[in-house]
């Protein structure tokens, strides 16, 4: 039996809607996972797409997603408390850039540099994938270069770049991170490099 194009479109639409429902269900689990007085679920970065290994315990998935959402929100807000809530005390950056300190101090220093250049930076989670103790996030960063980067003042130009991170989660916190950012696009938009 042959499937028509309209049937394929309808199936894809149902699948997308199913994914949205699944993402909403996972997000609702977060509300009960947030400690009193902590960042509320509504104020954390919300993934556009969530893909989850359904064989994993729901509590484990909720913890892992919460850590990723806290970390993305840290990049938007620059709040050190979010980095400390998302990252394990013995956090290791497995793709540590030259000059960045290892451990939690590294992302905190990097965030300060980014926020000095792009005060309105926003980090959106385009995709979030949970498999065992790993979370993979595809991130989109945006904002305007109105601050200063390495002594160079911004002119208000728009900034858009992507990153992909792989987190290993232990006890609800990111213990290790392997990351890759489109630094070439970022540096070109900042005007540090010419295309």
Image: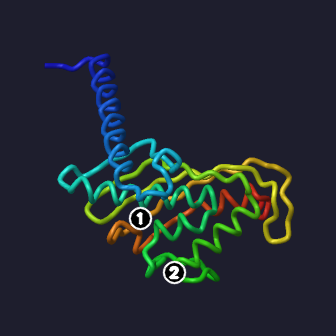
In the image, taking residue 137 as reference, residue 9 lies left or right, namely: left
Q: Earlier in the sequence, mark 2 or mark 1?
A: 2
Looking at the image, is 193 positioned above or below residue 21?
below
Q: Quadrant of the C terminus?
A: bottom right
Identify the image's colour scheme: rainbow, by chain, secondary structure or one colour: rainbow
Residue 122, position in %: x, y?
62, 51
Residue displayed at 35% across by 41% down? 23
Judged from this view, the residue extending furthest toward the front is 36
| Horizontal side of residue 64 vs 96, given as left or right | left
Q: Quadrant of the N terminus?
A: top left
- Evaluate if marks 2 and 1 touch, with contact meaning CB atoms under 8 Å apart: no
- Residue 75, x across and y down, in percent: 59, 60
The residue that label 1 is drawn on is 166
The quadrant in which residue 25 appears is top left
Residues at marks 2 and 1, CA–CA distance in whole angstroms: 16 Å
Residue 7 coordinates in the image, percent (x, y):
27, 18
Taking depth in this image into account, of 54 and 97 the one nearest to the observer is 54
Give the residue displayed 37% in from the left and 45% down from the top.
27
User: Disc 2 designates what residue?
Assistant: 103
Front tag of 2 and 1: 2
87 up-or-down from 22: above or below: below
């Amino acid at each position: 039996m042959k499937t028509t194009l309209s049937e394929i479109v309808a199936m894809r639409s149902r699948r997308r809607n199913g994914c949205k429902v699944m993402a909403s269900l996972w997000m609702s689990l977060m509300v009960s996972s947030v400690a009193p007085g902590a960042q509320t679920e509504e104020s954390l970065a919300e993934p556009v797409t969530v893909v989850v290994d359904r064989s994993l315990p729901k509590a484990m998935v909720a913890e892992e997603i919460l850590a990723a959402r806290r970390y993305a929100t840290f990049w938007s807000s620059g709040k050190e408390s979010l980095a400390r809530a998302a990252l394990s005390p013995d956090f290791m950056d497995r793709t540590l850039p030259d000059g960045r300190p290892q451990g939690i101090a590294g992302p905190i220093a990097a965030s300060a540099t980014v926020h000095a250049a792009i005060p309105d930076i926003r980090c959106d989670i385009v995709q979030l994938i949970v498999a065992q103790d790993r979370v993979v996030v595809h991130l989109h960063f945006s904002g305007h270069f109105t601050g200063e980067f390495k002594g160079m003042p911004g002119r208000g130009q728009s900034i858009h770049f992507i990153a992909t991170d792989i987190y290993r989660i232990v006890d609800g916190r990111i213990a290790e991170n392997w990351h890759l950012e489109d630094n070439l696009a970022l540096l070109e938009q900042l005007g540090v490099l010419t295309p």
